[in-house]
Image: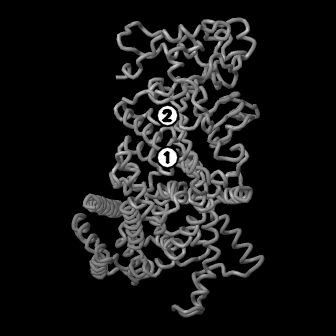
Amino acid sequence: MRSYGIYVLTRFAQFLLVVFIGISLTFFITHLSPIDPVEQMIAGMTAMGQSDPEAVSLMRTALQELYGTGGPLIEQYFTYWGRILSADFGPSLSSFPTPVSVLIGRALPWTIGLLATCTVISWVFGNLLGGLAGYFRENRMLKLAGVIIMGFHPVPYYIIAFVLLIIFGLMWPILPTSGGAAANLPRGWNAEYLISVLRHSILPAASIILVGLGGWFMGMRALVSNVITEDYVTYAELGGVKRSRILPFYVIRNALVPQVTGLAMSLGAIFNGAIIVEFVFSYPGLGRLLISAVYAGDYGLVLGVTTISIVAVSAAVFLIDILYPVFDPRVKLA
Amino acid sequence: MVKANGKAGNGPVPAEPILSVRNLRAYYQMQYFGIDREVRAVDDITLQVNRNEIYGVAGESSCGKTSLIKTIAAANRPPLNVIGGSVKYSFLDRDIFRMSEEELSRVRWKHLSYIMQGSMNVLNPVRRIRKSFIDFAFRHINKPEREFFDIVARHLERLRLSPSVLKAYPHELSGGMRQRVTIALATICRPEFIIADEPTTALDVVVQKDVLAMIREVQQEMGSSILFVTHDMTVHANMADRLGIMYAGRLVEEAPTREIFANPLHPYTAHLIQSLPRIGDLSPKKALPGAPPNLSDPPAGCRFHPRCPLAMDICRRENPALTALRPGHRVACFAASSEVRPVSEIRETVPPKVAEARS
């Protein structure tokens, strides 16, 4: 148990280091670039005709204060860290003066709700079907399922998104095609609102799941066909161990180890948002926020989204690292 | 050192067969780009294993030993298919190939268990040893869980393992311990018949000696029969009551162990035994010229003829049948059958002290 404590501590130190390096890199990359958001904003305003030098200088100081871009680089760097640690990324440029953290906080639940659910659903079903298809290789239904899933897999998901949009939004309009929920409904934890959220999420979710399923399916099927040739599976079969025991505890259990890592990585990656799907379905998530922030040159917002994504991906890796001994007892020795 | 079983060769033992294999053929049938390819790994093998006997199968690598015993255990999976013949156990009412998967799983481990090749790596790496015991043996030993583990613990002690191994994962045990765990696993249900495929090949000689002694001990205590497969003739000398020699998918000679070491009739067996090191014998060992035949295209007639110093014309045309030249000694060789040596000569030959040679 003590060695496990040390293991967790070293992994946690690694996690902090990765986050530190990642955030520092985003800082230096953005701050060393010639684009200065304050100057851009001032240029935008003075282009309107107003150019009282004193007012401009006052405005510059005020804006630099807001964005933390005053003073030498190293001083900015420390201010930047101070702001990140208090989760304050300054006001958004494009929706001035709403703070970046509020914008992100608004978009985050949508993205997490949609993508985490989709990722988990496609992981569970992909692995289940892939595991069965790898184990019962002669089963016709599973072969058919494999062909269908593999048929969807290479199609880019925005194509599927558009096809779904055309079918269910245009030809047979039974599902809403844009937004996160009906606009006229007040937010709240009531049945009506939640059903509306669910209905709005069906099409984007379907396009993500249909495509995502294939990767897990293929991976699991390949892993299982490998595992079933392992000695311990042959041995269990020779021992007359029931198939209902061999499949979950000998085959799936061993094949699942790398898939769990994969799940953690994709769960970490959802904080980037599913940019295209969110855009196609006008889903109010992080992906759409990021796209509009980039278009608007909204410096603080881009930094905020990137930071969250860095922390989330590294946290996922850290979590999976400390949970790994549960899935694979051999890791304890590492 | 385990001593060679004294029973061997001491006159006729009332032979009560527990396993009889008749004309067994099992081929690997594969297709590459539409071309059928057949590897005749088990070709027309007939043998019988008696109760309370250790029957050794010897032969060089890729002669079909493992394919043979996999087929005998009905554990062959495509592309290894049974082409013909029968495998009958005294505890089964019919041919093992006529039994459903369901019926077989009731027999496995209770009557027929298996120590697999490379058995250091046959334990599920993510499952504790106690779970493996539950998976393999619990349904056969009709006892509540606590009593079951009492039995397991006592059995482990017999193999000089502490009951604490039950809590371990396989990777936490040493190779020799894992080996003993698989032997414990294979013998916990006191099966009548145990198939052991190279159970000690991966172990160093010291551990090997212990493990062999334990297998022998457990076998004698339970009165089981063992079909013991290894390419290591010295292990056979110590373990087997009777020995079958395989060459290129066929059984070429079969006799009580002592007899076969003293008086090998097949030229291949003779070479095999001659190649064993002996104390005081400093002469360089000669290798048999040539290589074992490709089993997908075996030579016509006797499969050994291209390498055989005694090959005659008939050897190239016809396949010699396994015939009993002396009581309990069968051999498949035209040269041997044409000039069987007198019994007196056999008695004079000193059996090789293989046990000493090993140390």
For label 1, count other residues whose C-alpha is less than 10 Å away and answer few (under 14), some (14-19) or many (20+): many
Query: Quadrant where the C terminus of chain B lies?
Result: top left
Q: Which mark is residue A237?
A: none
CA gap, disc 1 and disc 2? 14 Å
Q: Position of residue B325 (x, y in %)?
A: 65, 16
Q: Is residue B285 above or below residue B89?
A: above
Query: Quadrant where the N terminus of chain B lies?
Result: top left
Can residue A34 be seen at all in this image of the molecule? no
Chain under disc 2: B
Q: Position of residue A60 (x, y in %)?
A: 30, 77
Question: Camera-side residue: A255 or B185?
Answer: B185
SS class, disc 2: loop
**Where is mark 1, residue-wise?**
B186
Q: Is residue B197 above or below residue A300?
A: above
* Label 1 or label 2, whichever comes before in sequence order: 1
Question: Camera-side residue: A250 or B301?
Answer: B301
**Looking at the image, is mark 1 or mark 2 nearer the viewer?**
1
Q: Which mark is residue B198?
A: 2
* Pointer 1 and pointer 2 on the same chain: yes
For label 2, count other residues whose C-alpha is less than 10 Å away and answer few (under 14), some (14-19) or many (20+): many
Can residue A75 be seen at all in this image of the molecule? yes
Question: Camera-side residue: A55 or A194?
Answer: A194
Disc 1 vs disc 2: Cβ atoms closer than 8 Å? no
Point 70% across, 47% down: residue: B93
Point 31% across, 73% down: residue: A84
Point 30% across, 82% down: residue: A55
SS class, disc 1: helix
Chain under disc 1: B
**Amino acid at pointer 1:** Ala
Residue B36: which quarter of the image?
top right
**Amino acid at pointer 2:** Glu
